[in-house]
């Protein structure tokens, strides 16, 4: 179906919102820069160079920080020829002697750089031309691959990122010639792909683009839209990827391994390919992605993570999932709790006409029932599918299941063994996906737990939460919460059962909370405000039950242990409990136990999660959303004025700022 101009323009909005303030590094080279000079006579209309200049200017004007690194190989060869110099190549690469270097500097940092700057400035892009010598922008050392001597060819050691960032912040678009300088003042010629990759890495760029003269990586005449490292190496072996494409692809993976989120190979010989790659769902080139970090959250750097109530990647840029807590902010958590309060006391039907499909590979009481009842209370419908009925990944691929369920449902709630399957569902479904527990996390549980702690007046920055038990899914979600809300989280688990170091690192690196991993439950319980435990043998680990009982025997939450905690400490358990194992009945049934409030709150918080996610989804017209929230707010205000004591428990000290966070 042909899109109208309005549709084309508005479909770019999610991408514009997403990339505002982000940095894109663009390697400019090939046909896009070697086409006849726009200054030359007889130049008609918009050429490739102008099209490129307009594209980068447009990106800059919508708030993307653009940094251009340019090549210019042909220009160097031309000038060398004109000067009667011979170009010498070693292993396919130019040998740079002193005279060649002189030519490289005068050409790249001179005529080529100034031409690019002038082009961009004509389009209104505020470009400033630089080379790596300026303010030691690129510190380099001699590059000596596998014993080749390429002369004065360098590799990047450092990039003066602070200065580059200052330039960007001042509103200019740096256009960089790939020339570096050593601490001793030796000047080096640097491959532009490698320089662009290094600069993108050091800047922590969102994206790195290589403009080439082909559509991207081609296989049997077809474009390869997505390329992982394993596949790339295979294609190099099969000689599908050859010549100059090999260093590009390798530079791309180097960039991905060092913090760049995505690399794109696009055809500089096609007009506006840059815009089409960025602002359309299908793109026009090859995108190069990490194997494991395909859906990764660059902020967390945790391999299997996806954003929390955030986006799941480029496939469906407007939908939001709840896969983990890593990109939820404190404000998000507070807003969710407030929305929970609101929904608890209204009979608003924000899910009217909506359908939620639950797909569960493991048993469940609380999660399943709270979602099903929650959806019904919000006016929607739900359907529970056990895995036997679906055969996720066996009877049918995850991708196909996700696509089919998306066409019937407005949301998919999944309880799965393998978190990667959840990531696959999220990637391929066009509707929000909620993690209802995987081997990696149980985010909905911890959101309900925070609400329960608040309900009991214990939620305060610095509260001590002692998690005593297995450092797996529930403990992981606590760690993610500790990266959001300031607390002292002490996790006591036997050796071999500590949390995943990547998730631990993520929480520690956030610097939000004090986090301890302990072998002694008594140290964890000491003066705790909350003592929390979970089963020693999680679903799917039944074969390890005996070994686990032995390993965990001194990690029981019992009356004795509770005596070490704060006298009013809450006793918490996500349930199901194995009474007599991880918790004794006297602890679980004690006056300070809130385990059944936790269970009940699963319902209230699930409702807020669903309202938030579906309210944000593209399928939900924004007017409906606003009407709904206005209605909810009014009802809430009325209830407050009718009954001032209305469930207004202390907890967060700040006044709730918004009913709803979008
Ligand atoms: N706490 C929890 O997730 O319980 P279920 O396994 O019963 O859903
Ligand atoms: N760790 C437990 C949590 C149950 C809610 C499990 O995965 O079985």
Image (cartoon, rainbow, N blue to C red):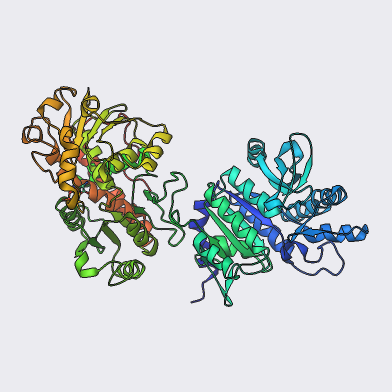
Q: Position of residue 611 (x, y in %)?
A: 28, 52
Query: Can I make out residue 392 in this image?
Result: yes
**Residue at horizontal 26%, vertical 63%?**
354
Percent of width and height locating residue 291: 46, 57
Residue 288, located in which quarter of the rendered image?
Answer: bottom right
Q: In the rendered view, does 333 fall on the left or right side of 219? A: left
The quarter of the picture where residue 137 lies is: top right
Toward the right, the furthest residue is 84
As displayed, is residue 652 above or below residue 326?
above
Relative to 354, 231 lies left or right:
right
Please name whichever residue, 250 or 130, is drawn nearer the observer in this view of the structure: 250
Residue 432 appearing in the image: no
Q: Position of residue 256 (x, y in %)?
A: 54, 52
Where residue 492 sits in the image (x, y, percent)? 25, 33
- What residue appears at the point 22 percent right and 23 percent down from the top-left corner? 526
Left or right: 630 in relation to 174? left
Indicate the quadrant where residue 476 lies: top left
Q: Would you place residue 606 above or below residue 357 in this image?
A: above
Tell how many labels.
0
């Amino acid at each position: 179906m042909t899109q109208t101009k309005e549709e084309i323009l508005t479909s770019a909005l999610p991408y514009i919102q997403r990339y505002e303030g982000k940095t894109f590094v663009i390697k400019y080279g090939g046909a896009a820069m070697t086409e006849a000079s726009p200054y030359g006579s007889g130049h008609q209309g918009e050429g490739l160079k102008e099209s490129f200049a307009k594209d980068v200017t447009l990106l800059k004007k919508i708030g993307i920080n653009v940094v251009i690194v340019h090549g210019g190989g042909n220009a160097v060869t031309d000038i060398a020829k004109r000067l009667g110099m011979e170009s010498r190549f070693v292993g396919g690469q130019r040998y740079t002697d002193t005279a060649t270097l002189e030519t490289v500097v005068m050409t790249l940092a001179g005529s080529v750089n100034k031409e690019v700057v002038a082009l961009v400035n004509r389009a209104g892009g505020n470009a400033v031309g630089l080379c790596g010598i300026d303010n030691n922008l690129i510190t380099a050392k001699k590059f000596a691959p596998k014993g080749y001597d390429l002369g004065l060819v360098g590799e990047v050691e450092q990039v003066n990122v602070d200065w580059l960032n200052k330039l960007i912040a001042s509103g200019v678009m740096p256009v960089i010639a790939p020339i570096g300088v050593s601490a001793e003042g030796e000047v080096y010629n640097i491959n532009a792909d490698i320089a662009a990759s290094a600069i993108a890495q050091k800047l922590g760029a969102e994206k790195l683009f290589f403009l080439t003269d082909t559509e991207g990586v081609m296989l049997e005449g077809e474009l390869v839209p997505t390329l992982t490292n394993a596949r790339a190496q295979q294609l190099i072996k099969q000689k599908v990827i050859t010549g100059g494409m090999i260093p590009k692809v390798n530079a791309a993976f180097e960039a991905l391994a060092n913090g760049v989120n995505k690399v794109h190979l696009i055809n500089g010989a096609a007009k506006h390919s840059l815009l089409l790659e960025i602002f359309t769902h299908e793109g026009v080139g090859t995108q190069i992605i990490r194997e494991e970090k395909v859906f990764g959250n660059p902020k967390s750097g945790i391999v299997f993570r996806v954003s929390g109530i955030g986006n799941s990647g480029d496939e469906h840029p407007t939908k939001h999932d709840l896969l983990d807590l890593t990109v939820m902010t404190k404000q998000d958590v507070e807003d969710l709790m407030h929305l929970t309060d609101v929904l608890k006391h209204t009979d608003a039907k924000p899910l009217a006409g909506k359908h939620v499909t639950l797909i569960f590979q493991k048993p469940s009481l609380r999660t399943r029932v709270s979602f099903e009842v929650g959806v019904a209370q919000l006016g929607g419908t739900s359907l529970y599918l056990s895995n036997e009925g679906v055969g996720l990944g066996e009877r049918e691929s995850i991708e196909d299941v996700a696509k089919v369920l998306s066409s019937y449902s407005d949301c998919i709630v999944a309880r799965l063994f393998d978190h990667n399957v959840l990531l696959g569902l999220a990637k391929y479904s066009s509707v929000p996906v909620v993690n209802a527990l995987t081997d990696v996390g149980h985010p909905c549980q911890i959101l309900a737990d925070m609400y329960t702690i608040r309900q009991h007046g214990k939620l305060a920055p610095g509260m001590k939460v002692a998690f005593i038990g297995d450092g797996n899914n529930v403990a992981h979600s606590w760690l993610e919460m500790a990266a959001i809300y300031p607390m002292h989280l002490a996790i006591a688990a036997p050796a071999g059962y500590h949390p995943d170091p990547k998730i631990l690192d993520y929480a520690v690196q956030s610097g939000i909370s004090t986090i301890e991993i302990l072998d002694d439950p008594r140290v964890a319980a000491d003066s705790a405000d909350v003592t929390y435990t979970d089963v020693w043998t999680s679903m799917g680990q039944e074969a390890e039950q005996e070994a686990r009982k032995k390993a965990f025997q001194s990690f029981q939450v019992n009356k004795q242990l509770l005596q070490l905690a704060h006298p009013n400490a809450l006793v918490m358990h996500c349930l199901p409990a194995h009474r007599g194992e991880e918790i004794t009945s006297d602890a679980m049934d004690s006056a300070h136990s809130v385990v059944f409030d936790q269970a009940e709150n699963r319902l209230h918080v699930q409702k807020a999660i669903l309202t938030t996610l579906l309210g944000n989804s593209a399928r939900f017209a924004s007017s409906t959303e606003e009407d709904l929230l206005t209605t909810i707010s009014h009802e809430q205000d009325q209830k407050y004025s009718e009954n001032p004591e209305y469930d207004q428990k202390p907890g967060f000290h700040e006044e709730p700022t918004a009913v709803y966070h979008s």
